[in-house]
């Protein structure tokens, strides 16, 4: 196997497709949104990407069949807007692997003709978000229209995110800019302790606006309710009901 | 030395050989079974595989002679059924090394004409197995016959093993499937704390059935008795006799 | 992207330029001095150096625009003395990366015609420096003039720095010497716990003398005062005023 | 710089030279012996070996001159017996680096015409050696004469050293055997907590016999006395004089 091995599953002709990246990260926000898009619009698998920089691992499906760890591109037809959606279970394991892998991802997006991209993720606040006020922070390549992003609800704040953007989402912008891709990173605020479907909903609302499509949210809402029950139970166990779960407890959820 | 260096020791002609992988892992289950096959059927060393991804280390034999760390393939004639059995003391040290090494292993198996493979291992339960009820969990490539495996005693359970299968055993399926190898992984349940000859016996019973061979178990039974004495002594030292040894104690055995 | 990717921003003709290296390290001393030179003399960006051995990360500027992590060379015209100043936010992440990256840096310096170099850094003393007595320790390549360095205030002490010099600064000397670069490392004494603008000032004074230029210090003095306020507050919180902040407290500043 | 860079300092003609390896390891036993040989017989530097797998570091000599980390080969004329002695301050940092580096070392030894080798090291016993009974354990390549080694005082014990031999010393045997080098590893017993000149003396006595040379031991004896004073002081501080220093105390010496 080569360092990167891209398996072509199908090769649809797309019109002005937009590249959507949703690999795992803080709160699994990006992954939730990307998977939701694939499920809601019944996306078609178009590429499998294998790499020696993923863990040497297979997953086992319900029929006992093992499948080598990989990332997937789906074609999603969102009410006429073509999307090329990247999802998966892993980021790269090494610095160099991140660069090599993101380059391969951008090659695929380019091959499909994507000239715009959204890298989806979460930004950790370190505390539970109150009153469902999930802001969506943004970062962007130089040639995007900041006002258009702001009109869709993206906030740009000085010195945030403080540590920059690490991983594939960051590199979609950093490496994308160097090859002429017009890209924005949409980061839902999230505690950072939990898989966060509510933060995913906030990101999806912004994305809906930017892509001019409509998405059914009910599945994400169901998952959000499940998470709230989990948090509620932890709070009860703490004897208070009103008390915040401790960081240590939350770290093990999700 | 190249990254991978395969030394040809002998090159027997084999008939419908089956590839058996038994490198170290949870409970050393796979390794015990593979070594038992080599010993019981008096296997012949056919290949040594050296790699810079193994520890930079030699072992010293009883005559003081140092030998560079490597994995070994033996040809085993199991009552007329040709087996190509892979054993060794190490897995690869890096993600990439796992992929490179497993690819080399599959090349050797292919060279010998193996079209079927069994990757052997253990699956950790986190507690000592009671009443000698050692189940054998399975995973498989798509082109295997699930019912045949189940008839031999392999269990397929939804969402198990939970974290997928990591290491060479997983990749024998994952990379094997991509090159047309028909492979199953047989994983004996084991506490995960001890070298587990009883779990190895359970796997061997399934394998016996699948390969239609008969194997003498007495050596594994002896080793199992030795392990039970060890566990018994630990329990006595704990002052109880009935108490379970703590994880910390068990971690240092085997 | 290649392992190292050097972007040419501009290509000025320089006269007898001197290469100044100021990447992050102990007390950020080297980085403070190098950045101060670029700011005071209004340097021009001439090269961006990208590498897969930096973290896979973008920084986000005040307008929300993401920029891929890189090191920068600026041309600084210091009152007629041409300088080629290297700054950045990261050292390499691996042993090999340090060698590859420093080689690339030295290639750039050579391309601009630099035959002399100063690698700037800090040397940790493990305790706060008292009475503003910030000594500057030196190391050098064989073909430099030790007496000239000493006349400028550089101290050479037996067996110091005890552990040698690690990172890009060390390699500018070690690899530089092997290609005929005449280089010295100037290391300001610093506690090692804090970003240390006073140590940077001490290094800058030495450098001023060696380069025969004059630099306005006021910005560094302002930053030094800010740091003193921070230390003062910590001492107050300790209830003493006169007590030294503990190592643990200081470790988290800067 | 290449991954490995060998600098030819001089190229003497040698007669039946023997390769001696003494890089740092347990108790620094091998390094002490090798450096002692170079000093006693006034060896000449013949090669410097640089590698990107050593730390990115320079050492600074008494005149302030920085030198890039490297290993050194000296030619030692030991009363007419030519030796090629390898010393240095580091082992490789990675698995692969150990293999690459030892291969380079063996290439140099072969270039000088060495057909025999001694890899020197220590074997940790976990307790201080009493009554100056420092045994020297051995391991060897297949074509060496075990009885000759035993006659010189080398002991071969079943299952020792228990974990095999790790690092360059192990690979000198493991990789050496594969290219026809006749090699033995001489491992002085040592606590493993201290730099151990007494263990080095024991190894040197064996080596003296095997090479049929005589070496003045006084420098090693002086160093041994210094170490004994250090241990004595620790024992006094413990209030007992007769008590063994604890592992924790010893770990920080040497």
Image (tube, coloured by chain):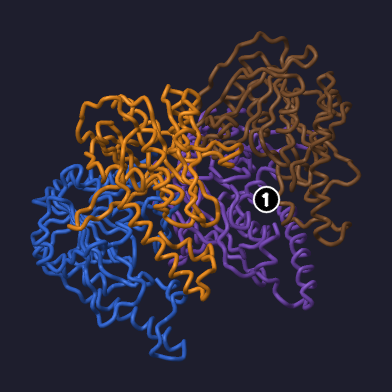
Chain colours: A brown, B orange, C purple, D blue
Q: Is residue D115 above or below residue A141?
A: below
The percent position of residue B14, horizontal first and vertical second, equals: 24, 27
In the rendered image, residue C55, in percent from the top left (x then y), is placed at 60, 41
Above-or-below relation of D73 to D41: above
- Determine the image quadrant of residue B119: top left
Q: Give the residue drawn at x 40%, y 65%.
A: B229
The local secondary structure at tag 1 comes to loop
Location of residue A115 in the rendering, given as x and y in whole percent from the top left corner: 70, 17
Residue D120: where, in percent of width, then height? 24, 61
Q: As rendered, which of B198 and C142 lies closer to the eye?
A: B198
Taking the image as shown, residue B200 lies to the left or right of residue B64, namely: right
Q: Which residue is mark 1?
A: C215
Residue C194 in view here: yes
On screen, residue C161 above or below C167: below
Residue at screen point 59% across, 20% down? A47
Q: Quadrant of the C terminus of chain B?
A: bottom left
Q: How many marks?
A: 1
Q: In this image, D27 relative to B127: left or right?
A: left
Q: Nearer the viewer, residue B13 or B235?
A: B235
Residue at 46% x, 32% y is: B149
**In the picture provided, is D65 more to the left or to the right than A252?**
left
Quadrant occupied by the N terminus of chain B: top left
- Which residue appears farthest toward the right when viewing the image? A131
Say left or right for B91 vs C46: left
Chain holding disc 1 = C
């Amino acid at each position: 196997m080569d360092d990167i091995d891209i398996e072509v599953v199908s090769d649809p002709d797309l019109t002005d497709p937009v590249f959507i990246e949703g690999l795992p990260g803080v709160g699994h926000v990006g992954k939730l949104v990307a998977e939701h898009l694939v499920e809601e619009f019944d996306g078609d698998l178009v590429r499998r990407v294998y790499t020696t920089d993923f863990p040497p691992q297979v997953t086992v499906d319900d029929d006992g069949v093992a499948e080598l760890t990989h990332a997937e591109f789906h074609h999603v037809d969102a009410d006429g807007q073509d999307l090329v959606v990247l999802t998966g279970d892993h980021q790269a394991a090494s610095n160099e692997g991140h660069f090599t892998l993101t380059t391969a991802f951008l090659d695929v997006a380019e091959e499909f003709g994507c000239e715009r991209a959204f890298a989806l993720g979460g930004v950790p606040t370190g505390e539970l978000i109150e009153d469902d006020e999930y802001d969506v922070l943004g970062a962007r390549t130089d040639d995007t229209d900041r006002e258009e992003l702001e009109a869709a609800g993206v906030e740009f704040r000085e010195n945030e995110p403080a540590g920059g953007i690490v991983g594939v989402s960051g590199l979609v912008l950093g490496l994308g800019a160097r090859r002429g891709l017009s890209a924005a990173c949409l980061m839902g605020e999230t505690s950072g302790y939990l898989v966060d479907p509510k933060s995913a909903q906030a990101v999806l609302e912004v994305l809906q606006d930017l892509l001019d499509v409509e998405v059914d949210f009910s599945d994400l809402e169901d998952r959000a309710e499940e998470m709230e029950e989990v948090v509620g139970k932890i709070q009860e166990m703490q004897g208070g009901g009103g008390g915040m779960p401790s960081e240590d407890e939350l770290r093990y959820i999700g």
